[in-house]
Amino acid sequence: MSDILVVNSGSSSIKFALFTHASNVSIALADLKLRYSGHFSGLGGGRCHVSLSNGEGETLVDAGLTPASNHDDALTQLCAWLAKHENEFELTGVGHRVVHGGRHFQAPIVVDAQQVQALEQLSSLAPLHQPYCLAPITQLRKQLPTIPQIACFDTAFHAQQSEVVRRYALPRELSERGLLRYGFHGLSYDYIQRVLADYLPPQAPRERVIVAHLGNGASLCGIQNSQSVASTMGFSALEGLPMGTRSGSVDPGLVLHLLDQEGMSAAEVSELLYRRSGLLGVSGISGDMQVLLASGAGEAEEAIELYCHRIAHEIGGLVADLGGVDQLVFTAGIGEHAADIRARVLKRCAWLGAELDIDANAQHGPCITMPSSRLGAWVIPTDEARMIAWHCLHVLQAGSTEPTAQE
């Protein structure tokens, strides 16, 4: 048996999951058995909450985990919990979601301190994520020194996009220094494209698929024959769709105006675009879509409409990149649970032949279009943790215990 711990660390939370796999079975996503999953939330804010569930989703009480004061405390507790239950499983690796891999990290790797330092240089490209992704690697390398720490990159799925798609119209020397479009949410997209066949009828066309990963962070990806062709996110996780608190794409001239005419510093502009914009900025109420849908305020409705308009607009661009579209998949928190958002987006996709099945959409699918619809639309839950565990097992099976970077 092989057991993989998956850690997904954010600015105020740590999600974790433990998967087991029979070593004599070929590695398939469905073969990974979830044994435990947990969540430390509200870290650093004085109101931490911790939860732990078994593989059947049943909440475990008195599990030995208590609210943590910060990320280090949470990870220390997690390691103590693992040690307490070491007779239940054989931990063979820890997989980490790392948001940005840059040019050089295009596949999951076992990391050491040198690799972590290289990845820290990318923190300015994903300031809300990268530092928090990397800190657990450093800490767990100390607390679990014999266990390989494996980094799985959200940018890796997009690494084979064409140079035309990845380039900005900037001087070549800047592109050669890594100022390129990378794309994100790759672990989610990788999972969806691998399980799509489990949902679609056998004869349904699936060569050209658009996946909408709609959560607090949001992006779209055009996938052709299981390969990423284009994504709405680019150099950073700021480009593309409006998000919970992120602006999405804005005119670069607007940024220059903020710096030159409004007298804002670079740090103030970063704070504005990453933390005070998006759904929160437009509505002035919240960056939480559930709150906005229940609000009834005109400002909330405007934020929702802007969000759906931009999604439909970007779908049009991806249809052009793919040369058409066969299926549209909604996933992540908003995509999986907000029927109203899906309905609004599909209404704007009527030109693609989308015919919404109102009842199926209200029940969250999986198929939410009518049999006569030319465009198939689906609700498929993503599972980034399972995808990370799958990648980790492949790295370990291949004997990749030495850190590597791939061009």
Image (cartoon, grey):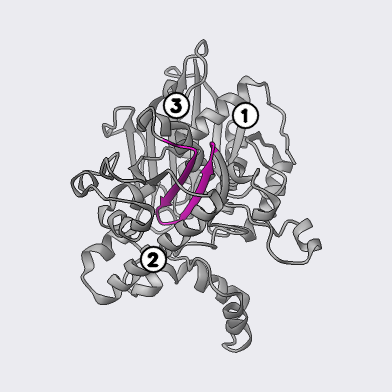
Q: Is residue 160 magenta?
A: no
Above or below for 205 versus 220? above
Asked whether the beta carbons under mark 1 and mark 2 sit within 8 Å of each other, the answer is: no
Q: Position of residue 213 (x, y in %)?
A: 43, 50
Determine crowd level at label 1: few under 14, some 14-19, many 20+ residues with C-alpha closer than 10 A. Answer: many
Magenta residues (range): 205-226
Residue 329 showing in the rendered view: yes
Q: Is residue 211 magenta?
A: yes
Mark drawn on residue 309: 2
Q: Is residue 295 left or right of residue 380?
A: left
Q: On the image, numbered disc 3 is attached to which residue? A: 19
The amino acid type of the residue labelled 3 equals: Phe
Q: Earlier in the sequence, mark 1 or mark 3?
A: 3
Q: Nearer the viewer, residue 214 or 143?
A: 214
Q: On the image, numbered disc 1 is attached to which residue? A: 148
Q: Residue at x 62, y 23 (%)?
A: 396
- Dominant SS of magenta comes to strand
Determine crowd level at label 2: few under 14, some 14-19, many 20+ residues with C-alpha closer than 10 A. Answer: some
Q: Position of residue 273 (x, y in %)?
A: 51, 70
Q: Earlier in the sequence, mark 1 or mark 2?
A: 1
Q: Give the quadrant of residue 305.
A: bottom left
Q: Residue at x 67, y 50 (%)?
A: 102
Mark 1 lies on a secondary structure that is: loop
Q: Position of residue 55 (x, y in %)?
A: 33, 27
Mark 3 lies on a secondary structure that is: strand
Q: From the image, state whether disc 3 or disc 2 is nearer to you.
A: 2
Q: Single out the residue that lies furthest toward the left.
A: 359
Distance CA(mark 1)–CA(mark 2): 44 Å
Q: Give the quadrant of residue 347.
A: bottom left
Distance CA(mark 1)–CA(mark 3): 15 Å
The amino acid type of the residue labelled 1 equals: Pro
Residue 243 showing in the rendered view: no
